[in-house]
Amino acid sequence: MEGRKTMDIVLKIWRQENPKAKGRFEKYELKNVVPDMSFLEMLDYLNSELLQQGIEPVAFDHDCREGICGCCSLYINGKPHGPETKTTTCELHMRSFRNGATITVEPWRAAAFPVIKDLIVDRHAFDKIQQAGGYISVNIGAAQDANAILVPKQKADESILGASCIGCGACVAACKNASAMLFVSAKVSQYALLPQGRPEAAMRVKNMLAQMDALGFGGCTNTRACEAECPKGISIAHIARLNREFIIAKLRD
């Protein structure tokens, strides 16, 4: 790092040995941090320093480090994924913080996302919601021609926007009710807007919402915190569509 401008920071990081252990904040001083480091690279650097001191490294989740997988879910200085908008933790860089800053890092706080260790939470609840109805059933056979089922561009674009949800859980972490409505609505929109998704539309919305409630997520009270903190900028207009789909499904019942 010689010859490059560096920064010194103080990290307050949540440490918790296992789901049943009592957690606490630990403070670490980290020197010579390069501003061009990503936030996760900074945590890698911290862990290398801790290992040299004989201290157990901080456990945190990551995979693609390209803002696609949603694994890098951290609560940074009171905001999901940190201070930048439409940015995942792995896309956040240390130049977003000032030299000498104290940075508080926590896991998601929601009953449906129990802490596994340190900064890692169990987000299998989202998988269970997806399994309840976030799919399309088709008969196996030869693929149809691309133009066999016409889809208006506006609806195709909206469906793609719903599909852009990476399931990180920032919407749940930001919501005072720990609601998963933005996630569920994005997945419902992804299929409800396409002709291929219409045959199972009623079953899908009822099953996914029932699973969301069963897993302990809260209800939506339209504070729009989820929309503001979503790294993919998904709109709460999807929640309005979800509500319409659910009302129509119940009326048909």
Image: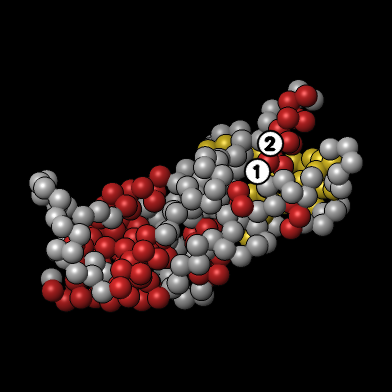
Percent coordinates x, y for residue 74 in the rendering: 60, 50
Q: Is residue 226 above or below residue 134?
A: below
Residue 21 percent location from the top left of the image: 59, 36
Residue at (72% x, 46% y) in the render: 37
Q: Which residue is mark 1?
A: 40
The amino acid on which the numbered mark 1 sits, given as a three-letter code, is: Leu
* Image label count: 2
Q: Which residue matches tag 2? A: 44
Q: Residues within 10 Å of mark 2 (few under 14, many from 20)?
A: some
Q: CA distance from mark 2 to mark 1?
A: 6 Å
Q: Are marks 2 and 1 in contact (CB under 8 Å)?
A: yes
Image position of 173 (left or right of 102): left
Percent across and percent down for residue 133 are: 25, 55
Q: Disc 2 marks which amino acid? A: Asp
Mark 1 closeness class: few <14, some 14–19, many ≥20 residues within 10 Å: many
Name which residue lies at 70% across and 57% down: 77
Whether residue 248 appears in this view of the structure is yes
- Residue drawn at (89%, 41%) of the image: 3
In the picture, measured across the screen, residue 152 lies left or right of residue 2, that is left
Relative to 63, residue 183 above or below: below
